[in-house]
Image (tube, helix red, strand yellow):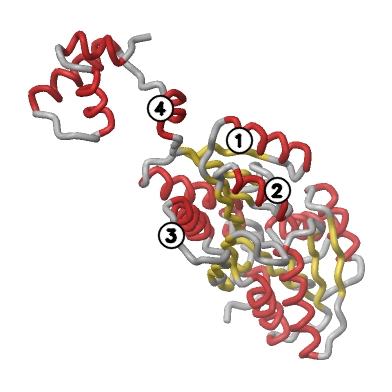
Amino acid sequence: MATIKDVARLAGVSPATVSAVLNNSAPVSPALRTSVERAIRVLRYQPNVLARALKTRRTHTLALLVSDIRNPFYTALVRGVEDVASTHGYTVILGNTDRRPQKIQNYLTTLLGRRVEGLILTHVIPHSRVAALRDQGIQVVFLDVRPRTAYADAVVVNNAEAAYEAVRHLIGHGRRRIGMLGFRSGLSTGRERLEGYHRALREARLRPLVVISPLGAEQAEEAARRLLRRRPDAVFAANNTMALAVLRAARALGVRIPEDCALIGFDDVDWMAVSDPPLSTVAQPLYELGSTAARLLLERLGGCGPQTPSVQVLRAHLVLRWSCGCHD
């Protein structure tokens, strides 16, 4: 591989001049810059990123760990993070954890070795682990989740309020036996959406009808069948996996949506608009969630931002389609 000295020799300049061209760290005349750039092309020179990182202690690399890359929910989140990072000269490493603690730990160990500067997580890790990462110079931002106590920055939506509004909509259109298919994960998102559901039913003096499922597709569909066999006249599904499970279970059991049972989901991923019937849902600003998390992380890396960990709450909104049987 060509070295910076090889480039300097071919261009007839000093290695310092080549470095100035590569890093834009000092003025270089147009003629010398042209010579250096020509030598770089001829020799196919590639800067040694690791060597530069050891010298400058900067890698301009971030990491984003998601729970399940198969879930289309993460597509726009990832794009939002990557767009902001690349605009500021950062590369993003994407990892899929499957919510497995050992896999998460393996990633954290690897990322430390790669000297990433910042980490965005879509699941919570303990305070002690966040503190250990900070001791290594790695800033942490939680995305779409937040810990019970604020020991790191987080970017979320107003989950409880959005769930409340969705269930209130069903109540306002005459539904009285409203079930909820929630998910078991220990995350703030699931807890907050369940809180919003309970609040809406409590105010209307209606009895809750809740089934909680693991996040796997097969387990969710079985849980949806159990819920539908109890004959609710509406279901609030706590995320896109749960909503799809209700649609499949309803088809298998001969339950007509929305005639027999109205349905509102959460997330508004692409397939919801073209499902049969098109699915009413709580839409999260997914791209904005990702881009906000990336900007917050870069602020931390630049020494800016609040003195204490912050929680930025974006607003989700209800998108009405045919599955709830009403459009207003």
- Label 2 crowding class (10 Å Cα cut-off): few <14, some 14-19, many 20+? few
- Label 4 crowding class (10 Å Cα cut-off): few <14, some 14-19, many 20+? few
Residue 259, image x, y percentages: 74, 73
Q: Which mark is residue 112?
A: 1
Give the residue type that dot 4 points to: Arg
Tally the marks.
Answer: 4
Please tell me which residue is depicted at 55% across the width and 50% down the height of the picture: 139
Give the residue type that dot 2 points to: Arg
N-term-proximal mark, 4 vs 2: 4
Q: Which mark is residue 304?
A: 3
Query: How far is mark 2 from mark 3, CA to CA?
Result: 22 Å
Q: Can you say whether 140 is above or below 49 in the image?
A: below
Give the residue type that dot 3 points to: Cys
Asked if the residue at tag 1 contacts the one at tag 3, i.e. Cβ–Cβ closer than 8 Å, the answer is no
The quarter of the picture where the N terminus appears is top left
- Front residue (pair 203, 157): 157
Residue 249, image x, y percentages: 82, 57
Q: Can you say whether 320 is above or below 47 in the image?
A: below
Give the residue type that dot 1 points to: Leu
N-term-proximal mark, 1 vs 2: 1
- Disc 4: which residue: 52
Determine which quarter of the picture holds residue 25.
Answer: top left
Asked if the residue at tag 3 contacts the one at tag 4, i.e. Cβ–Cβ closer than 8 Å, the answer is no
Disc 2 element: helix
N-term-proximal mark, 2 vs 3: 2
